Image (cartoon, helix red, strand yellow):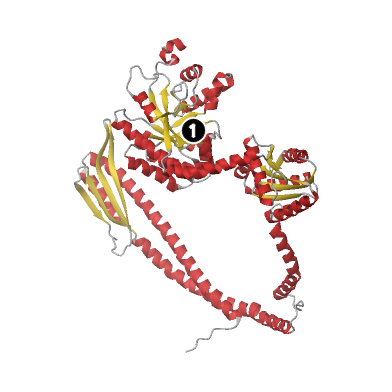
Amino acid sequence: MTISFPRGIGTKLLLIVLPGMLVGTVAMFLAFERIDERGRMAALQLRLDNFAITLAAALVKPMWEFDDTTVERLFAATADVPELLEARLVYADETVLAIARGHRADPGFVTTLHKSMDLVQKSPTGDVTVGRLEVAFHDGLVQEEIHSQRAGGLLVLVGSFLLLGGATLIAVRRIVAQPLSRLRDSLYRNASTLTREPLVWQARDELGEVVGAYNQLLAEIDQHNRDIHHLAYHDPLTNLPNRQLLEDRLGHAIAVAERHQRQIAVLFADIDNFKVVNDTLGHKQGDRLLNTVAERIAATVRGMDTVARWGGDEFVLVLETISSPGEAASVAEKLIEAVGVPVALNTTLIRIGVSIGISLYPQDGRDVTTLIKNADMALFEAKGRGRNTFHFFDQAMNNRALRRLDIAVALRHAIAQDQLELYYQPKVDTRSGAIVGAEALVRWRRPGEGIIPPGDFIPQAEESDLIVAVGEWVMRRACAQVLSWRQQGFGDIPVAVNLSPRHFQRERDIDRIIALVEEAGIPPSLIEIEVTESTVMRDPDLAIALLWRLRDHGFGIAIDDFGSGYSNLSYLRRLPIRTLKIDRAFVADIDQGKDGAEIVRAIIAMANALGLGLVAEGVETEAQLRFLRDADCAVAQGYYFSRPLPVAEFEPLLRPSEPPVFAARPILARPLAALT
């Protein structure tokens, strides 16, 4: 048997529309019925709650007074409740006093709802539980109402569908099928002549508009081709040349400069702290700022020069035919001045800066890739020197970049080959001098180089997932050391471990940290997780959720370098933190003047008011320790007590001594009265 499909578009539209209408109508009917059922069940639950509360309140006193007659009378009356399935009254010793079943208990119900309430009598000696009331309602009446409503709804549904279907059938034939047939004939005539001349359609209806749009499309094809070509070589946001056009123009400029023995300057510019604008004002305002900066940069250079958007908040300028490096420096200064003019975004006045790296042809490179790469290196150097400035490329930058690459590659092998070591810096009670914990700090002993400072390899690890592997290695070793100290009889020594912001970008990394501690077999309370304020601010909601997960497993949470970052008190209130670590910069300022001391005093007062622990970092002088002790900061760490030590040198500090190991420090050796 051959199945023939309809050829007319009107019939096809009906075959598509009508089933869709049917499915949509049925779906809406079922959805409304489901919503209604939920509402009825919620009302039934509310009736059950009110019934149980009311009956319980009436039964407490008779049961307390052992008035069984009143209890039975009240309880028997419950059988008249239509929804009642069963009510049971039980003494405190689980003896059943009475059972009542509803007169309309119907085996056809679908769901039963239960409510249990303790009957509590208040007395001068305290609350006494005299029994328990258990009530169950059935939904038989609800189901009857729904079934009755469904029958009427189905009749309305069928009638509505038939009415809509008939109207749709007539509309499709008159509005779509017949005019399209006429348009088809006209298109056939046009196609048979093998021309692209505009179609002629006399009727001024919707299909006439379609024909007009078709004719306009033919006219706009060439314009669209030009637009596509423009988009292929220009940034859609700023309308500046993109990377591809930049590289083409720079290559041409190099060829001209080589032929005529001229100099070229490549300026790589990056807006400082642009991410803050995006995060605080939104991407729409960030795009407005990019457009404003692009206009200012373009207005700063000559018409023969090229300004391109490299990507994100980065721009590249090609200055052709410069007479000296000083000319490039002059342009960079003008650029910094122009970009630094405040920008009004909505009601906010934003002042931004720009960092610029400069490379020169031919001394810094003779091809496109090298010139742009070296300008980018110079930009990195400018950012490292405080931002909102410019810097010329020199070979030392290349050496530093190679060093960073070497560190990044070697660090992967260092983890696998166990070249990392943990050092421990004691945390000391400011009053007794006793060690109350330690902070674990990673060091890298690279064969042939010795100890590599953390500042040389931690930033490289932060740029990749290596920091996650380093963090797991530190956690594994720290847990093993805590267990070892416990086995050696030193007791439970809490250890603080720093976690990178990358640990708080994926849940599985935090789950791995939790698993490592569980595998080590030590209480999580002996591990304190230190995070910086910037860690939380990158993705506050996710970071806070993961910190709470750690807290719920028993870990302590500490905010490291408090006061050096955002210090957002609204987020501080939401964080599950146990300890604030005062940044070493504030501790150092204690000796410098009143302002520094008052800032530290305010942080201590706030932490004590919130019930948080405090650790002052970077304590190096007796005066700093005296101030912290008088200001009620309980714990301190720093070179005044000890530098970070390897395990072999740290363990002797843990041996019991009387007085405690650091009590001999001058400030701690004197009684408190002598310090006032």
Q: Specify the amino acid type for callout 1.
A: Asp
Q: How many C-alpha atoms fall within 10 Å of the one at disc 1: few (<14), some, or many (≥20)? A: many
Residue 648 position within the rendered picture, expressed as x and y whole percent measured from the top left: 37, 29
Along the horizontal axis of the image, is 265 left or right of 103? right
Residue situated in front as seen by the camera: 348 or 653: 653
| Label 1 residue SS | strand
Question: Toward the viewer: 196 or 240?
Answer: 240
Which residue corresponds to mark 1?
560
- Name which residue lies at 33% across and 23% down: 655
Does residue 625 appear in the picture of this structure? yes
Instruction: Please state if 578 lies on the left or on the right of 101 as rendered.
Output: right
Residue in the foreground of this view, choosing between 232 and 441:
441
Residue 587 picture location, percent across and down: 52, 24
Q: Taking 133 as reference, is 478 above or below it?
A: above
Could you tell me if residue 272 is visible in this image?
A: no
Question: Could you say which quadrant of the image residue 11 lies in?
Answer: bottom right
Question: Looking at the image, how many numbered discs can be counted on the residues?
Answer: 1
- Left or right for 497, reference 180: left
Q: Is residue 215 above or below residue 552?
A: below
Q: Residue at x 72, y 75 (%)?
A: 211
Q: Find residue 66 and report its horizontal and vertical position in percent.
A: 21, 41
Which quadrant of the view contains residue 61? top left
